[in-house]
Each structure stands twice: as structure tokens, then as C-alpha cells.
Amino acid sequence: MPFWIVASVFAAFMQNLRFLLQRQLKVTTLSTGGATWARFVFAVPFVGLALICYKIASGQAWPVPTEGYWTFSVIGALSQMLATACVVALFARRNFYVGITLKKSEVILTALIGLVVLGEAVSPPVLLAIAVGFAGVIALSDPPAGVGLAWRARVFNAASGYGLASGLLFGVSAVCYRGATLALDSGDAPLRAATALLTATIVQSVSLGAYLALREKGELARVAASWRISGLTGLTSMLGSLGWFTAFALQTAAYVKAVGQIELVFTFLFSAFWLKEKTSRGEVIGIGLILLSLALILWAAWPG
């Protein structure tokens, strides 16, 4: 099995755990900004330690940034930060499973952004897989009961807006992060991935931390007080992001995100068996389409 597929599946699983922890932070103690910042600031020491240990163990030289590295890194970092805030805000409006599902518009958007920014096209079978997966997202995004006409409520509601915004922003960050890993002049995929990840995480921690210090008095202290859950959030964030960045260093962002749809299966299991949230017929149909999409992308991307 290609290593980028393994890295993508691992990243999706760890991302699911991280969102679960952020949901706990959001619904118990922290604001949207605080729960978002906790993910980044507590990840910095983990990423830094992992980078130093891998660099020493592998004996490689530090990668040197080339043209475009800082532009890709900063835009990717800010886009991911805003996208994460949109997802955290979703938790107050929809159940955990549907909230995560709404952001999965990122797969088709990543393919479009990757084509425009990096000139990376995807094959017809992968386009079909993305289309099937997007149909699954639509099936999974039923509006709350009693909210206007079905089709209008499905499109024109706050949850859908947050989901679409997060999908677009996650698509931008995915393409930019791939661009950043390609803009490092040396090193294997894990070393370039960890280097780009540390850069992005520091940018996110400093920028959002400054915003919270100015606009949400006392929130930094509340994040620090939640160190037990926030520390686990940072650890899972580091592990998941290393998986994503490694996959981006090896494969087109659209392919990586398409495989990453397996996160929805993990989310469904957490929602049904841990959070005890009820699922609808539309959600069952949607998860079936997501599984079909995953099978198609694996068939298209498998060597030989």
C-alpha cells in the first residue's frame, strides 16, 4: 500500500479524535477562539520535539526554504486556523457527526484549488470518486427538523454556511501546505512535513493568541487552566497534522483529501457508540456514498 494512503488514513483518525476533544472544550469551558487556539499552542512543543528527534535520528540536514515557502506557509496556516474556528462553531449548531460532515465539501474544493494554484489535475476516476463523496455530504447535511422548506433550509442555514466556509478554507490550506513542502530544497517527506508543520503551527499560535489577548480577556488563562484536555488536543493535532503534511509531500492534495473522507466513518462510529447521538436515514445513505467514494479513490490510486 502506498505510504501516502497510510499517512492519510492515520491523519483522518487522529483528526477525528482531535475534533472530539475540541468539541468537549467548546461545549464546556472555552470560546470558539479559545478551543481553536488550544489545538495550535499545545501542539507546538510536540511538533518541535518530533522534528528535532527525527532530524537527529535520520542524520539529514535542515531543509532550506526556497521561493514561495513563506507565502504558502502563512496563507495555509491562517486558512487552516479560520477553517478550524468554523468547525468548532458548528458544534453549537449541529450534532458532532453532521458538523464534521458539512466541512467535507473541502474535497471537491481542494481539487479545484489545486488545479488553479499548483496546476495539479486529477484523473477522471478520481473526479467520479469526489462527486460520489460530495453526494454523500449532501445526503448527510439534512437541516434541523421544522426549519422552513426542506431544500431552502438545507442550503440557507448557518450550519451549512460554516460548513462550506470551512471546506473552502481547508481546501486552501491543503494546497498551500503541499506547496510549502515542495518549496523545501531537501529532506525526505517526514522531515519536510514536520518543518512546514512547525512553521505553520507557530504562525497560528502567535496570531490567534494575540487576537485572543486583545479581544477575549481571560480566555488565554482559561485555555491554560484546561491543560489536561488541551494537552491531549495538541498531541492529537500534532499526530494528525504530521500525517497530513507527510501525505501532501508525497501526493496531490486532492487525492489525499479524498482518502481522508474515511474520517467520516470514524466520526460515525464515535457519534453512534460514544456520544450516543441518533442517526437518520439520510445519514445512513450518506455514509454509504462516502464508503463508495473511498473505494473508488483507492481503486484509482492503487499501484498497478
Image (cartoon, rainbow, N blue to C red):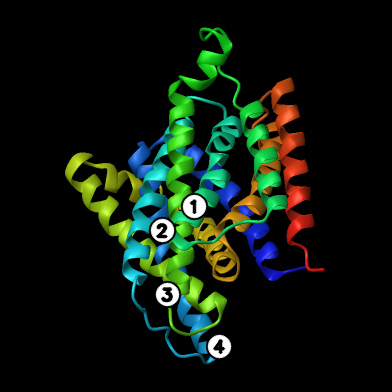
Whole-number angstrom distance, CA of label 2 to CA of label 1: 7 Å
Question: For residue 233, which numbered disc appears in the image?
Answer: 1
Picture coordinates of residue 216, whole percent (x, y)? 23, 39
Tag shown at residue 57:
4
Asked which secondary structure carries label 2, the reply is: loop
Residue 11, position as x, y percentages in the image: 60, 58
Question: Which of the two discs, 2 and 4, sits closer to the camera?
Answer: 4
> In front: 193, or 122?
122
The percent coordinates of residue 81 (x first, y second) are: 38, 49
* Measured Cα–Cα span from mark 2 to mark 4: 24 Å
Q: Are marks 2 and 1 in contact (CB under 8 Å)?
A: yes
Q: Could one spot residue 27 in this view of the protein?
A: no
Q: Read off the residue under disc 3.
A: 183
User: Between 3 and 278, which is closer to the camera in this rendering?
Assistant: 3
Q: Earlier in the sequence, mark 2 or mark 4?
A: 2
Quadrant location of residue 189? bottom right
Name the amino acid type tagged 1: Thr
Three-letter amino acid code at the position of disc 4: Ala
